[in-house]
Amino acid sequence: MRILITGGAGFIGSALANALVSDQHEVLVLDDLSAGDPTRLAPGVLFHRGTIMDRPKLWTLLQGVDCVYHLAARVVVAESILYPREYNEVNVSGTVALLEAMRDVGIPRLIFTSSGALYGNQERQPISETALPDPTSPYAVSKLAAEHYIQTIGTLWGTKTIILRIFNAYGPGQPILPSHSPVIPQFINQALGGGSLVIFGAGDQTRDFVYVSDVARALVSALHIKPPDRCIINIGGGTEITMNALAREILAQTNSSSNTIYSPVRGGGVSRLQADITLARKMLGFEPQVTLKEGLQRILREDPRFI
Ligand SMILES: NC(=O)c1ccc[n+]([C@@H]2O[C@H](COP(=O)([O-])OP(=O)(O)OC[C@H]3O[C@@H](n4cnc5c(N)ncnc54)[C@H](O)[C@@H]3O)[C@@H](O)[C@H]2O)c1
């Protein structure tokens, strides 16, 4: 198949692009490199620098495409609290721009990476797809709004759409940001550098981590299913871990004598996140293959920043 991945030079997008190209698909990537890095892409992936807001470019790239994976987005929760308009512009208006271009060119299928963050604080864990979303940040709002556009427009225009709500992806190459970094590379960096591991809040909040190659496999599987009309599927590891336990595991694996310190809780977070992955098992044959322990070992073995 000929496949376009928006945001394909990013952390998850590059893993997906490389998996698809090794399955002999023709893979095009559109990424504005606001966060991506095209050197992650395997030979054979056709990289194009540009934004999803560029209509003529989208039109050109969409010719002959069988399926679009839409990953391009702004993804930092804390940043979305400061710049909600920018998040709305890229994550919502950008998605609508893509949908319009897909309609104009006649692309039959869209697979979208949504987020477990849109569930917010849920009493009932693990969280199933039937839970009522309760976003706690503009980022989560933007992913939910994009989902609604995708489903509504998909129905109206006859585009087959699949939405994967990904929980916390992690793996080698996940960026460390100057502030508000994803927690795993941040903790590893702090542990190896001999600094303190900074935990926001009491450390009893949980997350459901899923290794990046498992996420890529789930996305690839979605290419081959016949989706029902409304298709939303959780992708997670299916287990939860507290930030305190994560910090202990990383300190043990890095053999670090760093300590943990506690900082006031940040806005936009949630207290517990654990994915119910029953539907992913049923529809995609998805089973996480990499445990958190093994995933952390792989990062320490394979990520050049930490070797
Ligand atoms: N990483 C996670 O834990 C996680 C969890 C849930 C959902 N997701 C979703 O998965 C997708 C990929 O996330 P990621 O973690 O790989 O983030 P990422 O920042 O590494 O990837 C996003 C990519 O989109 C590109 N991009 C941003 N704006 C663009 C635009 N206007 N035009 C073209 N490209 C643009 C960036 O340069 C980047 O390469 C996102 O849609 C995100 O919301 C990620």
Image (cartoon, grey):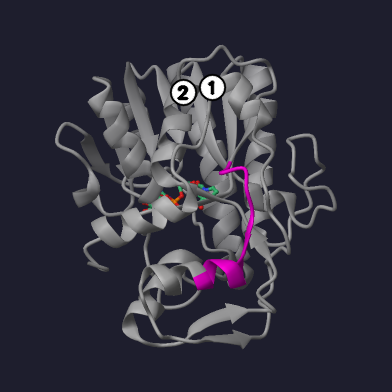
When the figure is inspected, residue 32 is found, relative to residue 109, above or below; the finding is below
Is 208 displayed left or right of 293 in the figure? right
Magenta span of residues:
236-248
Tell which tag, 1 or 2, sits nearer the viewer. Answer: 1
Q: Which mark is residue 156?
A: none
Q: Amino acid at mark 1?
A: Gly
Q: Compare residues 144 and 205 and report the one nearer the observer.
A: 205
Q: Which residue is mark 1?
A: 285
Quadrant (top left/top right/bottom left/bottom right) for the C terminus = bottom left
Q: Is residue 169 above or below residue 27?
A: below
Q: Is the N terminus in the top left, top right, bottom left or bottom right quadrant?
A: top left
Residue 230 or residue 102, whichever sits in front:
230
The part of the image, by quadrant, that contains residue 284 is: top right
Is 132 placed left or right of 242 in the picture?
right
Q: Nearer the viewer, residue 114 or 301?
A: 301
- Name the residue furthest right: 123
Which residue type does callout 2 highlight? Ser
220 versus 13 height, above or below: above
- Whether 247 is among the magenta residues is yes
The answer to whether one can see residue 54 in this image is no
Residue reaching furthest to the left: 43
Residue displayed at 46% across by 31% down: 219
Residue 256 at x, y percent in the picture: 38, 80
> Where does the image place residue 250, in percent across and percent down from the top left?
44, 69
Separation of marks 1 and 2 at Cα, in angstroms? 8 Å
Mark 1 vs 2: CB contact within 8 A: yes
Instruction: Residue under label 2, please give it.
Output: 221
